[in-house]
Image: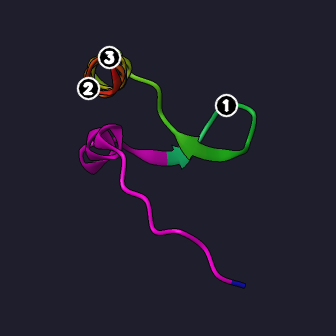
Amino acid sequence: MITMCEYRPEYACYKTAQCKRQADGQCRWTETQELKACLESKQKESSEKIF
């Protein structure tokens, strides 16, 4: 199978984020205020570049 290698600006937000076991026992990114703000900022930047 062939896939496209895509890098989105918001992926940079995960460099300092923590992936760990959550209260429900599942492992996933811990959604801190910093992570949420970074993701929103990067997604906004991406959408502004399209138009």
**Left or right, residue 27 beside residue 38:** right
Real-space CA distance between mark 3 and mark 2, rounded to the nearest whole angstrom: 9 Å
Q: Which residue is mark 3?
A: 44
Task: Where is residue 22? Give x, y as percent.
Answer: 62, 36
For mark 1, does the 10 Å Cα neighbourhood hold few (<14), some (14 to 19), or many (20 or more) residues?
few
Task: Where is residue 28? Give x, y as percent.
Answer: 58, 44
What span is colored magenta in the figure? Answer: 2-19
Seen in the picture, residue 32 relative to 3 is either above or below; the reply is: above
Task: Where is residue 33? Give x, y as percent.
Answer: 34, 14
Check if residue 23 falls in the magenta segment: no
* Identity, as a three-letter code, of the amino acid under mark 3: Lys
**Left or right, residue 5 beside residue 40:** right
For mark 2, does the 10 Å Cα neighbourhood hold few (<14), some (14 to 19), or many (20 or more) residues?
few
Q: Secondary structure at mark 2?
A: helix
The quadrant in which residue 49 appears is top left
Q: Nearer the viewer, mark 3 or mark 2?
A: 2
Q: Nearer the viewer, mark 2 or mark 1?
A: 2
For mark 3, does the 10 Å Cα neighbourhood hold few (<14), some (14 to 19), or many (20 or more) residues?
few
Q: Which residue is mark 2?
A: 49
Q: Which residue is mark 1?
A: 23
- Figure quadrant of the N terminus: bottom right
